[in-house]
Image (spheres, rainbow, N blue to C red):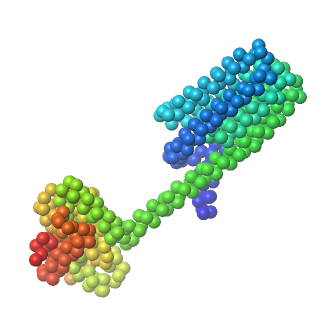
């Protein structure tokens, strides 16, 4: 856990909270896009309702001659979230999600400044708190990332002071009190937004680590730890898939049960370490002898199984069995000639009536034993058994 945390700290950039790895940053944005979409749409709808709700104040605090201008400003500002809400259902939103959401907050902020500029000075205490709401809305609700929110709120604060301090000449003590609350909202909302996004990205990294670890252990549970080949469990699943395919498409499939001849002597005389080394080499040769669509599995000891998929005819299985025997006859390094390995192979072709995974393996196994008790170093088809 500590190692992962340290790795996370060095990967995240301190201010921008971007990942140093562009591919990781792209993956994060892709994976979190559904959440951003859902949160953004919800926030837009709620924000529009709140914006309209604030209009109820106009009855008491906006002079009749300014009422039309105030509503013009309010409805103009509402056009932006309406547009972004529509765009959120298109691919254009996905490419520039943060900029679209920032535009919603910008419209809300500048719309409020435009509305307040038309309200008498004595009534501004009923309107400027909305700027505080926009601050929290930007940092903590709509899903805008911290750097975007900070930049926008800094721009809104500067515009607020420019318009009401220089153009409309608000008294200094009133403007100062407004600034105290707006800046305080930025400190609280900004700090919260920063910490939430930072923790969210750390959790994302942790989830990726856990998923990678889960896949690793799952993969390991389905593969032989010595050779890296699929184990019996994964082989059963692959044969089950081949069974289903053979029934749908009526294509010929083949299972080859391979048992090494003479491996016990090698193991006894050269030691288990050398025996394991030879099994790895055998596994490599078997993999190089088959197609990518085929499966080579180790099912125990010196026993292997090859699942040959979608054969054109029975001739293909004869060709494959011969190829496997030839490759295994090639002398293995570090093995003295008297201890050279050979193989006995039993073959079961399917589909056939009443077939099952266990029956296919059993038939191939019995055919292999027929070779084993005869001349060895050969192969036999299960259909030839009496």
Place of residue 43 in the rendered image (x, y in percent of width and height, measured from the top left): 62, 37
Q: Is residue 108 left or right of residue 325?
A: right
Q: Answer whether residue 257 is visible to the viewer in this image.
A: no
Q: Is residue 80 left or right of residue 188?
A: left
Rendering quarter of residue 311:
bottom left
Q: Is residue 383 left or right of residue 19?
A: left
Rendering quarter of residue 304:
bottom left
Q: Residue at x 27, y 75 (%)?
A: 303
Image vertical order of residue 182 relative to residue 287, above or below: above
Image vertical order of residue 238 relative to residue 332, above or below: above
Place of residue 299 in the rendered image (x, y in percent of width and height, measured from the top left): 31, 73
Image vertical order of residue 17 relative to residue 344, above or below: above
Seen from the viewer's position, the closer of residues 292 and 183 is: 183
Place of residue 148 in the rendered image (x, y in percent of width and height, measured from the top left): 64, 36
Place of residue 263 in the rendered image (x, y in percent of width and height, measured from the top left): 26, 80
Q: Residue at x 76, y 39 (%)?
A: 185
How many labels sit on residues? 0
Placement of the C terminus among the 4 image quadrants: bottom left
Q: Residue at x 78, y 29 (%)?
A: 128
């Amino acid at each position: 856990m500590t190692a992962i945390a340290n790795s996370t700290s060095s990967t995240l950039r301190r201010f921008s909270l971007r990942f140093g790895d562009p591919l990781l940053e792209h993956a994060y944005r892709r994976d979190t896009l559904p959440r951003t979409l859902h949160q953004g749409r919800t926030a837009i709808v709620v924000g529009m309702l709140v914006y309209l709700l604030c209009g109820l104040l106009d009855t008491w605090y906006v002079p009749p001659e300014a009422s039309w201008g105030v509503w013009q400003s309010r409805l103009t500002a509402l056009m932006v979230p309406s547009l972004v809400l529509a765009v959120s259902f298109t691919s254009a939103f996905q490419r520039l999600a943060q900029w679209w959401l920032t535009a919603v907050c910008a419209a809300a902020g500048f719309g409020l400044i435009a509305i307040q500029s038309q309200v008498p000075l004595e009534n501004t205490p009923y309107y400027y708190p909305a700027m505080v709401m926009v601050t929290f809305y930007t940092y903590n609700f709509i899903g805008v990332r911290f750097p975007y929110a900070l930049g926008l709120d800094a721009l809104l604060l500067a515009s607020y002071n420019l318009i009401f301090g220089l153009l409309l000449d608000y008294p200094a003590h009133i403007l100062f009190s407004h600034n105290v609350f707006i800046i305080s909202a930025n400190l609280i909302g900004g700090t919260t937004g920063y910490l939430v996004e930072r923790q969210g990205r750390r959790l994302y990294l942790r989830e990726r680590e856990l998923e990678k670890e889960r896949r690793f252990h799952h993969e390991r549970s389905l593969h032989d730890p010595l050779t890296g080949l699929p184990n019996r469990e994964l082989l059963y699943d692959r044969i089950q898939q081949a069974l289903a395919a053979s029934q749908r498409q009526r294509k010929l499939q083949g299972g080859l049960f391979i048992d090494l001849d003479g491996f016990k002597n090698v193991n006894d005389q050269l030691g288990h370490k050398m025996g394991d080394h030879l099994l790895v080499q055998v596994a490599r040769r078997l993999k190089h002898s088959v197609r990518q669509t085929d499966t080579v599995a180790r099912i125990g000891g010196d026993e292997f199984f090859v699942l040959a998929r979608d054969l054109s005819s029975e001739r293909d299985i004869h060709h494959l069995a011969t190829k496997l025997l030839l490759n295994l006859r090639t002398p293995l390094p570090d093995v003295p000639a008297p201890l050279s390995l050979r193989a006995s192979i039993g073959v079961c072709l399917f589909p056939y009536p009443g077939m099952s995974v266990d029956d296919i393996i059993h038939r191939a196994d019995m055919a292999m034993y027929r070779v084993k008790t005869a001349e060895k170093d050969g192969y036999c088809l299960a259909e030839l058994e009496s």
